[in-house]
Image (cartoon, grey):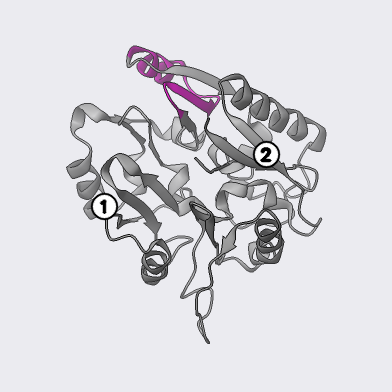
Amino acid sequence: MTQFIMSSPTAFGIQYEINPFMYGRIDQTNRTRAAQQWAELRNTLIHIGGGVTVAPHGPEYCPDTVFIGDAGLVAGEQILISRFKNEERGAEEPFFHSYFVDEGFVVAEYDTPRVSREKLSFEGGDAIFNLATSILWLGVGQRTALEFKSCIEAFLEDETIVVRPLELIDSRFFSLSTCFCPTEKGELLWYPPAFSDYSQYTIELWYPKDRRIEISEADALALACDSISMDSHLVMPEVSAELVDILLARGYEVIQQDMSEFVQSGGGCKSLTLKLS
């Protein structure tokens, strides 16, 4: 059974502006509606055969702990907690550290003496495994610094897993999870303009044309790539009928969720979950 952790949405709201989705939306979150959307996502995952553990909500001054997919990188019983570039989200780190220790995880340490978050940062949403090819894709250039790659390699301690950086060049797609979604069917849902030319070339080397599904700008901004792939299921925010038709024709069971309260903060279905297995 695929296992996920979700974090209670009780403290969720837009209290600051750290990505373009948030601009002009401070204090505009409907918390009741957000809680309903979160619960519907949890129920959907359970309905399709997933297991969900619910973590407590973070402090009121940490509204984004609900996006637990950003908490860090999990490998077995170990976790590498994120070192968030934004100070606002950096306040979440003690909460996540305490939670995962209490849950029995080994929390990895890394040495960052006198190095600012601006120069050495890492966010869990930038690290996406593709175990079929023993690759950990790493989004860099927005929230994660390329220099953090060595910390991740030391954490993994597995020479069979190659960490491949992908440069993100559009501030609207600040995390790899917003524009890059490998599926369990071996295909890729992605938005090419979010990446540098060289990173597009790298992706195209690993995913042949018939395995790549390029999405429109509108669907990218609806966070279509911030989706959960589980067997043939794709659990995703509400997207265009055209994209749904493409996915259905490829054999996916598309489950759309109203994630509007979270999308306006820059997060979708995948960001609200941390996949363990």
Picture residue at 69% right of the left edge, 66% below the top: 94
Q: Nearer the viewer, residue 83 or 161?
A: 161
Q: Can the viewer see residue 88 in this picture?
A: yes
Q: Amino acid at mark 2?
A: Thr
Picture residue at 25% right of the left edge, 29% below the top: 211
Q: Image quarter for residue 54? A: top right
Q: Tell me if residue 204 is in the magenta stretch.
A: no
Q: Position of residue 5 (x, y in %)?
A: 63, 42
Residue depth check, mark 1 versus mark 2: number of the one nearer the observer: 2
Question: At numbered mark 1, what does the secondary structure look like: helix, strand or loop?
Answer: helix
Question: At numbered mark 2, what does the secondary structure look like: helix, strand or loop?
Answer: strand
Give the vertical position of 166 relative to 179 (above or below): below
Q: Nearer the viewer, residue 76 or 38?
A: 76
Give the vertical position of 242 relative to 10 (above or below): above
Picture residue at 50% right of the left edge, 24% below the top: 239
Q: Amino acid at mark 1?
A: Ser
Q: Position of residue 184 (x, y in %)?
A: 37, 30
Q: Tell me if residue 242 is in the magenta stretch.
A: yes
Mark 1 residue crowding within 10 angstroms, few (<14) / some (14–19) / many (20+): some
Question: Which residues, given as a range, are shown in magenta?
Answer: 230-249
First in residue order: circle 1 vs circle 2? 2
Between the residue at mark 1 and the residue at mark 2, the CA separation in whole angstroms equals: 35 Å
Q: Nearer the viewer, residue 194 or 32?
A: 32
Q: Position of residue 45 (x, y in %)?
A: 60, 26
Reading the image, the residue beneath label 2 is 53
Badge number at residue 199: 1
